[in-house]
Image: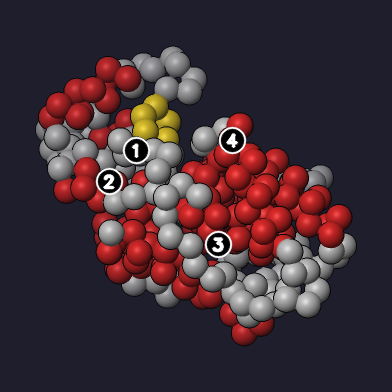
Amino acid sequence: MAATYLTLVTFFLFSLILGYSNALSVDYYHQTCPMVESTIQEAVKKAMMNDNTVPAALLRMHFHDCFVRGCDASVLLNTKGKNKAEKDGPPNISLHAFYVIDNTKMEVEAQCPGVVSCADILALAARDAVSLTGGPTWEVPKGRKDGRISKATETRQLPAPTFNISQLQQSFSQRGLSMDDLVALSGGHTLGFSHCSSFQNRIHNFNTTTDIDPSIHPSFAASLRQICPTHNKVKNAGFRLDSSPTTFDNTYYKLLLQGKSLFS
């Protein structure tokens, strides 16, 4: 479970690096909103009971928020007028479970009006998504400020599922994140599901000499090609990210070593 622990530590550091680190404190709401963490955890737990994809959605949402402009909840803002927000950028079209953060915000506001930022709520919800699916918990420093700028064009900064290792390393290094951080954050793919569009480049027309990425295990590639044919017409067709997609564990890494991962 060392890799799993490293993932958690990195999410903690990621929030520090990209989330107004000079103002953060574990006890930030100790006096002003002492029940905030338990309120958020209960809201996430309730949402999970109705939809087991919520944890993966919250973890991914937090990452997509942090990678663009830092952990400022700008991913939650809606398109307004001529400004197309991050939420509507191509990599974020498949984000979901925004309602969980909206509902949680309403509950927190009822207790502590105008005190807790949406950015902190999202960071705490992502932590709870991990702990409630079998991963450990950790202390989240709080005090992030909510961003007011959200641009769909800036979602191009997000690493694509088609990136090779060099492209991924460059993308992360631009944010002060190391190869260890990259490996650890990849472990977030222990939760969730991917649409065919994110990995079809590996199973159809991979390059001029081969149809299938040779790094994929042959039987795994064959099963993916059945689910995602060349001219796939099933809107939500796709495959789970590992064999236990609702449990936070290190299965993703084990499958990666066997050539049974979806992404490049």
Q: How far apart are marks 3 and 4 (CA)?
A: 27 Å
Q: What element carries label 3?
A: helix
Q: What element carries label 1?
A: loop
Residue 176 at x, y = what percent? 42, 75
Q: Distance between the residues labelled 4 and 2?
A: 23 Å
Name the one closer to the observer, 232 or 19: 19
- Look at label 1 and name its amino acid: Ser
Answer whether residue 154 is visible to the viewer in this image: no
Residue at which label 2 appears: 251
Residue contact between numbered discs 3 and 4, judged by CB atoms under 8 Å: no
**Residue displayed at 81% across by 68% down:** 115
**Residue displayed at 78% across by 57% down:** 108
Mark 1 and mark 4 lie on one chain; the one further toward the N terminus is 4
Residue at which label 1 appears: 244
Q: Quadrant of the C terminus?
A: top left
- Counting labels gives 4
Mark 1 and mark 2 lie on one chain; the one further toward the N terminus is 1
- Badge 2 local density, few (<14 within 10 Å), some, or many (20+)? many
Residue at which label 4 appears: 49
Residue contact between numbered discs 3 and 2, judged by CB atoms under 8 Å: no
Q: Is residue 248 above or below residue 209?
A: below
Mark nearest the camera among 4 and 2 is: 4
**Residue displayed at 43% across by 60% down:** 136
Q: How far apart are marks 3 and 1 (CA)?
A: 26 Å
Residue contact between numbered discs 1 and 2, judged by CB atoms under 8 Å: yes
Q: Distance between the residues labelled 3 and 2?
A: 25 Å
Residue at which label 3 appears: 66
Q: Quadrant of the N terminus?
A: bottom left
Q: What element carries label 2?
A: helix
Mark 3 and mark 4 lie on one chain; the one further toward the N terminus is 4
- Badge 3 local density, few (<14 within 10 Å), some, or many (20+)? many
- Residue 35 in which image quadrant: bottom right
